Amino acid sequence: MAGTSVVRVILINILVIIVVAALLFTGYVLYTNGVNYVSSDDAQVTGTMVPITVQYPGKLNSWFGQVNSTVNQGDVIGAESNNSVLQNTPGLEQLVSHSTTLQNRLTDAETIVSPINGTIIQNNASVGQVVQPGQVLAEVVNENDLNVTANIQESEIRHVSVGQTVDVTFDAIPGTTYQGTVSSIGDTTQAALSLVPNLTASSGTYTKVAQRIPVIISLGNGSISKSLVPGMSANVTIHINNN
């Protein structure tokens, strides 16, 4: 019995030591991460998406803006009918009738071209459709110049600065870590840019919540996988003591 009690005490002591060691190690890891890194899983792939519009109202007599098609800057995507443009823009016919220069400008304006090199990711137009200035016919994104936008909590943003190294992983590409760099830090919170304004304290229903500031992370030309597209989820770990 005495021997069994001794063994039990030894086992209990060993278990206590293991638990304490695990707690100390966990505390060390958490402290080290808190001192050296700022992490966020509130991040996604972003890029400059450029809308394609027209200068004059009219009817499309040709359109080649197919989704996933690759275009170069200046490539013709479609054209408006000359008659429809003149009919839908009062006074324009009289204005250009006596000027060859204005007629040429009108012809150029009726030709719809891609504003950048990229891939068409959205198409809202078709042949025969009547279009108006400001109407988005299609959107083009340069998939060779994508970045990551991470929303960092306001309590941690003071540790983040331009030029810091960032480890980036994507849900779509498990097991692969990309190296990025903080390229810019937003001057306002995401809530301030929201279409739905936050309630203020003066309304009597204000609830304080942690705000998030957008941080743009550049991945560098040629380092992005072709399987990435805007909107995909990402996880970032910013090295705040690497400078």
Image: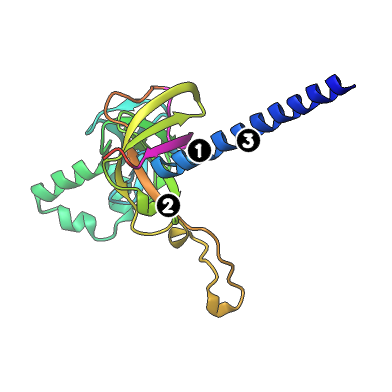
Q: Which residue lies under the disc numbered 2?
A: 156
Q: Is residue 209 left or right of residue 101?
A: right
Residue type at mark 2: give it: Glu
Q: Is residue 200 left or right of residue 130?
A: right
Residue sitting at x 49%, y 60%: 195
C-alpha span from label 1 to label 2: 19 Å
Please say if 4 is above or below 84. above
Q: Which residue lies under the disc numbered 3?
A: 20
Please say if 80 is above or below 1. below
- Occupied quadrant, residue 37: top left
Mark 3 closeness class: few <14, some 14–19, many ≥20 residues within 10 Å: few
Quadrant for the C terminus, please. Answer: top left
Q: Are marks 1 and 2 in contact (CB under 8 Å)?
A: no
Residue type at mark 1: give it: Tyr
Measured as percent of width and height from the top left, residue 137 is found at: 39, 42
The numbered mark, 1 or 2, whose residue comes first in the sequence reads 1
C-alpha span from label 2 to label 3: 29 Å
Residue type at mark 3: give it: Val
Measured as percent of width and height from the top left, residue 181 is found at: 30, 37
Q: Which residues are magenta?
A: 227-240
Q: Secondary structure at mark 2?
A: loop
Q: Secondary structure at mark 1?
A: helix
Mark 2 closeness class: few <14, some 14–19, many ≥20 residues within 10 Å: some
C-alpha span from label 3 to label 1: 12 Å
Q: Secondary structure at mark 3?
A: helix
Who is closer to the viewer here, 201 or 72? 201
